[in-house]
Amino acid sequence: GYRTRSAYKLKQLDEETGLFGPGNTVVDLGAAPGGWLQVAAEEVSDHGTVVGVDLQRIRDIDADNVETIRGDMTDEETKESLRERIGEEGADVVISDMAPNMTGEYSLDHARSIHLARQAFEVALDLLPAGGDFAVKVFDGQDLADFRADVEEEFQYVRSIRPDASRDESSEQYLVGKHRITAPVAAGD
Ligand code: SAM
């Protein structure tokens, strides 16, 4: 079995949008305790690679194609170690299930969630070549529309998905950006 119920959310995102393929390099942000790592490791098969990052230590996953980095994704240092690990070729998919420690104060939790989602988006823009995919957890609220609009500018299309495995009372959803576009810079008017 999987370590988390979140694993089933990722399976649904993959089924609905076709995130993973054999041989892919996947970056998983906020990866502890490792449910998403287990799903991604299966989907990319032996010749793929999954790199997980979390503030928390991640207990070893029983798969040879998974590596983990312990660090804070809001730190430049962690972004740099990830960049070094991924190398020139970049990643095929960046996924993030990062969530803040919930305070119960709706607007604060929302703002922190969008902040983490933007960190993940920055990593996606850094590591994904054209054609790459991005999936990120977000909580509903006032800043979501602006964030989504920013993601829409960088991908061919964006879908919002509320997985069946998310709790009913939860305000979480996932944005999936498919096929990164690397648009040529507009040459003036
Ligand atoms: N997808 C995971 C799984 O299936 O096992 C569950 C992820 S859990 C919902 C959210 C994770 O985000 C927590 O483990 C937390 O430590 C991590 N996280 C939150 N803020 C972070 C940050 N700034 N940098 C790295 N990880 C972070």
Image (cartoon, helix red, strand yellow):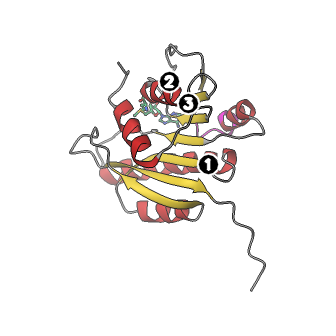
In percent of the image, x 56 and y 48: which residue is there? 133
Q: Can you tell which mark lies on residue 158?
A: none
Q: Amino acid at mark 3?
A: Val
Residue 183 position in % (x across, y down): 69, 65
The image shows residue 112, relative to residue 26, as above or below, that is below
Q: Is mark 2 within 8 Å of ligand 1?
A: yes
Q: Is residue 71 magenta?
A: no
Q: What is the C-alpha distance between the residues marked 3 and 1?
A: 14 Å
Q: Amino acid at mark 1?
A: Gly
The earlier-in-sequence mark between 1 and 2 is 2
User: What crowding class fits label 2: few (fewer than 14 Cα within 10 Å), some (14-19), or many (20 or more)?
Assistant: some
Residue that carries the numbered disc 2 in the rendered image: 56
Residue at the limit of the structure toward the left, as seen here: 168
Q: Can you tell which mark lies on residue 132?
A: 1
Q: What is the C-alpha distance between the residues marked 1 and 2?
A: 27 Å
In percent of the image, x 69 and y 49: which residue is there? 129
Which quarter shows the C terminus?
bottom right
Residues 121 and 162: in front is 162
Q: What is the C-alpha distance between the residues marked 2 and 3?
A: 24 Å
Residue 87 position in % (x across, y down): 76, 35
The earlier-in-sequence mark between 3 and 1 is 3
**Would residue 174 be visible to someone looking at this image?**
yes
Query: Residue 74's quadrant in the figure?
Result: top right
**Would residue 101 be visible to someone looking at this image?**
no
